[in-house]
Image (cartoon, rainbow, N blue to C red):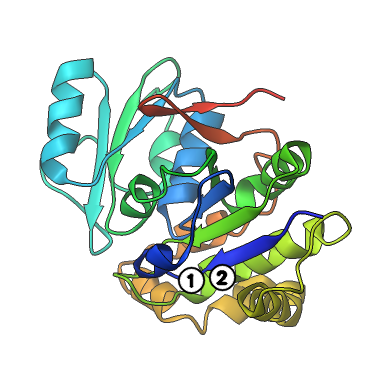
Amino acid sequence: MPKLDICFSPELLPLYDLRGQVAVIVDILRASSTIVTALGEGVTHVFPVATLEECAEYGQRHGCLTAAERDGIQADGVDLGNSPFGFLDAARPVRGRSLTISTTNGTTALRRSLTAKAVVVGAFLNLEAVADFARQQGRDVVVVCAGWKGQFCLEDTVFGGALAERLAPDFDVRSSDATLAALHLWQQGKTDLSAYLLQSAHVRRLNSLEASEDFEFCLRIDAYADILPIWRDDRLITLLP
């Protein structure tokens, strides 16, 4: 039976051997939720990059939309920040466009996980798509939580617990204390996820930026249940069901 493990922060990745495994990159607030939304709304592919300089370079080289934030605030000189609502604005059509994105935590976590056999992006928005893919692969899975500047982050870990609950019939979710802890956190908070996660330091930080609508949107479970961003060559594309 394959195992499910949770890496609480990219800083802990040296302790994990991702080779041959599925890495699920999760940054609920907001990079992974934004990437899922972008692809769900018709963006053709996404170039996730670590630095603002790379974001600008990719935008020029590929003629794509640029999105970037630092400390939760939209960076200068880019088309969009890190809000999923940027891809839901009828005044700025995104269908058929490509995107490059750089964020404080999420894109860095992804770039550091590329030794895995498969790299996908997970969010509450596409929880079932991630679970389906994991079942189909039949490989060990590591949820890589983006965290906040290398530190533990509640909402990313709770996503890991939600995935563990869905995969429990087919995966070993008890051999890792990290997964067991994530599962307990999810089971404690799932009946009122919004209220539960309002305790999170990252949520309070985001809400201080007047982004409470982003918070509520990013907790919508399976709003894009058939969208699975997966790494192919140098970009994320949508794996069609």
Q: At 39% from the left edge and 62% from the top edge, which residue is drawn?
A: 211
Residue carrying label 2 = 157
Quick one: SS at disc 2? helix
Residue carrying label 1 = 8
* Position above or below: 78 against 10: above
| Drawn side of residue 239 relative to residue 57, left or right | right
Q: Nearer the viewer, mark 2 or mark 1?
A: 1
Disc 2, disc 1: CB below 8 Å? yes
Q: Position of residue 108 (x, y in %)?
A: 31, 52
Of residue 62 and residue 114, the one placed in the foreground of this image is 114
Give the residue type at disc 2: Thr
Of residue 174 and residue 209, the one placed in the foreground of this image is 174
Quarter of the picture containing the N terminus is bottom right
Give the residue type at disc 1: Phe
The image quadrant of residue 61 is: top left
| Drawn side of residue 11 relative to residue 239, left or right | left
